[in-house]
Amino acid sequence: MKKTLFIGSTVLDMVVELPHLPSLKEDINTSAMNAALGGCSYNASSIAHHLSLPYIHCSPCGEGFFADCIKQLLAAQNRRPFVCIPGLDNGCCLCLVDEQGERTFISHHGAEYLFDIEWLKDLHEDWDMIYVCGLEIEEKTGEALIQYLNESAHAEIVFAPGARIDKIQPERLQAMFQLRPILHLNDDEALAYTSSKTVNEAADKLYQLTHNTVIITCGSDGAYLKNNDEEKLIAGFKADVIDTIGAGDSHIGAWICAKKLGMDDSEAIRFANYVAAETVSTKGPALSEQSYAKIKAYLQEM
């Protein structure tokens, strides 16, 4: 099995639980607060890490307070930064979670969102799939990342543009679509970007942009699949939602792993739906060992 190359951030998530989002000048107390590793690429790659599938996580780290916290938390998992950038600290993501489990992100970006082609030039290209998030495309080094992807014709590209898809520079987004990536979005993102009224309409429009597989997650309803052969909603799993942090990231990470294990698109989405249900049933983006035991058992049953 060839590796998956995950390109993108590892950040410190400060998860703040609130009864509701505060209004202007409101004084509000938190229900709980904790810190954990997060970041779209980190969350997605963690599924491969815990399922012991081969991967490389091209995720830079800086130096400073936040960077030191990240290095310590990675070391506890027998992981380490892919490359260290001197003179620049990492950022942090403030994750506000209301009583319904919905999250609002306030992000400060640092070294973790940057990219340099030189980081990968001495590695043998033994990967056949590359994951990339929209946040890295939007950054100042986004053009270099697109150039690298253009030079990686041997690999299938999985692109998760995220909630800021409308903030990505139009010419960069068009360049990404021209790479014919597999697209992964949630229903709100897909409907808003395509100005569609239904998910299947949004999927059709997105497919016309890339002519490749489109996956649209639909919360508890599951995920919608559009590819060259089929178009359908694949049912989700019941879950007691605690928060939705990292649900989309874990979904695409699980889909990638399932594809590497030989599943077709529908089977891979069914497995990804199961993993996402486990994620929303957990505080923060990090799944417990108990959750991974359940995931591995479900995988064996498929």
Image (cartoon, rainbow, N blue to C red):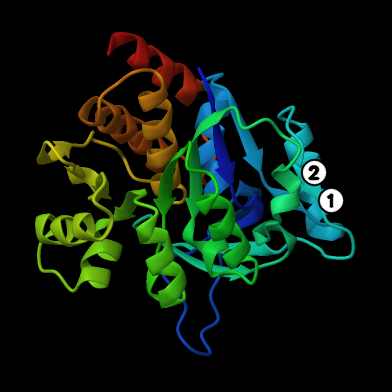
Q: In which quarter of the image is residue 233?
A: top left
Does the rendering let one see residue 273?
Answer: yes
Left or right: residue 174 compared with residue 96: left
Residue furthest to the bottom: 25
Lateral position of residue 73 relative to residue 205, left or right: right
Which x, y percent locates residue 214? Answer: 25, 48
Circle 2 Cα neighbour tier, 10 Å, few/some/many (<14 / 14–19 / ≥20): some
The image quarter containing residue 13 is bottom right
> What residue appears at the point 36 percent right and 59 percent down from the top-left corner?
178
- Numbered circle sitting on residue 28: none
Mark 1 burial class by Cα count in 10 Å: few <14, some 14-19, many 20+ = some
Q: What residue do we see at 33% from left, 33% from top?
A: 272
Q: Which residue lies under the disc numbered 1?
A: 68
- Seen in the image, is 108 located left or right of residue 207? right
Task: Say which of 30 and 16 sits in front.
Answer: 16
Give the percent coordinates (x, y) of residue 130.
50, 41
Residue pictured at 51% horizontal, 53% vertical? 150
Decide if residue 101 is on the left or right side of residue 8: left
Of the 4 image quadrants, the one containing the C terminus is top left
Give the amino acid type for the residue marked by disc 2 in the picture.
Answer: Lys
The relative height of residue 235 versus residue 163 in the rendered view (above or below) is above
Q: Which residue is drawn at 76% across and 31% down?
A: 76
Task: Give how far across and how far down residue 133 sits, in percent.
Answer: 49, 55
* Residue furthest to the top: 300
Residue that badge 2 annotates: 71
Q: In this view, does 251 lie above or below 261?
A: below
SS of the residue under disc 1 = helix
The answer to whether the residues at label 2 and label 1 have Cβ atoms under 8 Å apart is yes
Disc 2 from disc 1: Cα separation: 5 Å
Q: Please, what is the three-letter code of the amino acid marked with disc 1?
A: Asp
